[in-house]
Amino acid sequence: MGNKNSVTSKRDRRREGKTISGTALEFQAQAGNTQGQKPRGLQTADYYQMVAEKAPNEFIVNSRKPIKPRTKGQDNAFRMLNEDYDLSFLTGPAGSGKTIAAMAKAVESLNTYRADINDMTGYSAIHRILLAKPPVSMNGHSNGFIKGGQKEKEEPWVQAMLNELKDLMGDEYGPAMKDGRIQIVSFEYLRGLNYPNSFLVLDEAQNAHRKDFYAVTSRVAMYSKMIILGDLNPLQCDLPNVSDSGFHRFISAMEQNDMENIGVAHLSNDDIVRCPLVKRIISNTEKFEAAHANKPFPSHPVLENGAPKGARFDYLEDAAHRPANDYH
């Protein structure tokens, strides 16, 4: 694995004028660019200047202000993503900033797309963002039960990522969805397909079977990037058998073998910024589960008359005698 403490090496190499070599972009015509042109309808010269001069823990998605980390863990995650590894893993609890970090990096890469692979200094080869998520829900349904065509069936699964992209891209979000710069790909059909010049983000990866990881991660193609997001907490895995999840297994395999060009960053409960209540809920639940691991599930505290001690149900009796037209 790459050096986690070196956070500017690749960007420094680009500033030194070293270029990325390889074959012509396969999807150049689809992206609507000709060689040497900057992205259509995206950013100004000021934007590219901001990207070139940004700090190693920042993302530039527009020419107004950078996106900066709010916690120590996020700082480490932002720096890891800015290393531009071909494959990156970002783990953490709900509300810790995994999705916003991945989407910000994806948007920055899309905004700096350039078709001329002979001069990539300060630019990226990414011309579309692909979103995927394992089709596993809390209630056991698959996306087949959702009405509509493929697009309507897939959108609810990746709505969290779409919401972040909409906030980050503003008015450019609609055109990007329409012309294919943002696409939703079915997790079930990733096997056997190649996605060159793409930024693929897989969310809720803890719900991917361990066999699926080999199929998904092998989709990384020429000039592509992949970020895999997930939660290592077993309580957040919706597979029938938690041990079937390949998320922690795959990360451990990568870390233990120190594979080059693969980055990993772990967020913790200390990085939860969504809401103080979310942080307390997750922390309290984890403490409770740890204390009762491999033990019979504890009974609730002493009950009084079939109700939790101290609970009052006076309002039920009042409701029974209330006129029907008194409900609002």
Image: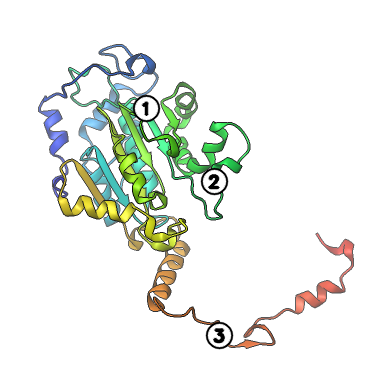
Where is residue 198, by image quadrant?
A: top left
Q: Which residue is mark 2?
A: 142
Q: Is residue 268 above or below residue 321?
A: above
- Residue under the point 21% across and 33% down: 53
Question: Which quadrant of the view contains residue 219?
Answer: top left
- State the separation of the CA atoms marked 1 and 2: 26 Å
- Asked which colour scheme the image uses, the reply is rainbow
Tell me where residue 141 appears, x and y as whole percent. 56, 49
List the residue tagged with mark 1: 128
98 horizontally vs 320: left or right? left
- On screen, residue 270 above or below 179: below
Q: Which residue is mark 3?
A: 301
Give the number of callouts: 3
Q: Position of residue 150 (x, y in %)?
A: 54, 32
Label 2 vs label 3: CA separation? 37 Å
Upstream in the sequence, badge 2 or badge 3?
2
Q: Amino acid at mark 2?
A: Ser
User: Disc 3 residue type?
Assistant: Pro
Vertical placement of residue 46 versus 147, above or below: above
Q: Nearer the viewer, residue 184 or 164?
A: 184
